[in-house]
Image (spheres, helix red, strand yellow):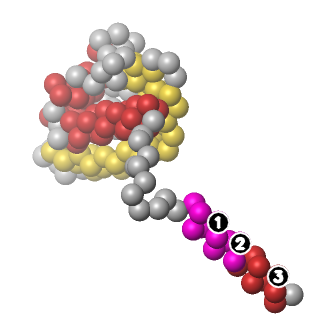
Amino acid sequence: MRSLGILIGLLLGFSLLAGTPACGKKEVKPTADMLKAREVREAVERLEKAYVERDPARFLQGIAPNFPERDILERAVRRAATAYDRIELHLTITLIRLAEDQAHVSVQWDGRWREAGTGKEALEKGGVVLTLQGADLRVTKIEGESPFTPFLPGSPRL
């Protein structure tokens, strides 16, 4: 029985060594999908940063002109920039599905919005799928609970 354990240990050790690249070998180059996924992640991070920094113009650069409810989203983002003196938003990408000319990004998020003047805070969390399309990876669709629309009374919701 002990020899079986040693044999298994040796086999595992050898397989680990065989799977480890030797010094001097070429680095593995990222695939096209890996590079695209990185670009998608960076596009989502730019949206998050612009929203948290309350910069509607920069945020809207990441939204496609043909976004179905762009006017509602724009009003909500502009209102958030003025109505809240602090926005904390954390987007966690859980899945990126790449298609020919678009990416579907599943995101879990949590946020805190503090109303200017009153200090009233809204805490929310949810999940959303963002569809990004085109060479510039702009959002063309938001499905689920959008993190980009404020939660205090009177705020437009998508």
Task: Tell me which residue sits at (37%, 17%) in the image.
Answer: 134
83 w.r.t. 73: above or below:
below
Q: What stretch of residues is rendered in magenta?
A: 10-19
* Cα–Cα span, label 1 and label 3: 16 Å
Q: Is residue 100 magenta?
A: no
**Residue 78, relative to residue 114: is it above or below?**
above
Q: Which mark is residue 108?
A: none
Q: Under tag 2, what secondary structure?
A: helix
Confirm or deny contact between disc 1 and disc 2 (CB under 8 A): yes
Q: Horizontal and vertical percent for residue 55?
A: 16, 33
Residue 155 location (% of width, % of height):
31, 29
Quickly name the residue at label 2. Answer: 11
Residue designated by label 1: 15
Badge 1 or badge 3: first in the primary sequence: 3
| Residue appearing at x 39%, y 57% in the figure | 24
Q: Which residue is mark 3?
A: 4
Packing grade of label 2 (10 A; few <14, some 14-19, many >=20) is few
Residue placed most toward the observer, 102 or 119? 102
Expressed as whole percent of the image width and height from the top left, the position of residue 49 reads 23, 41
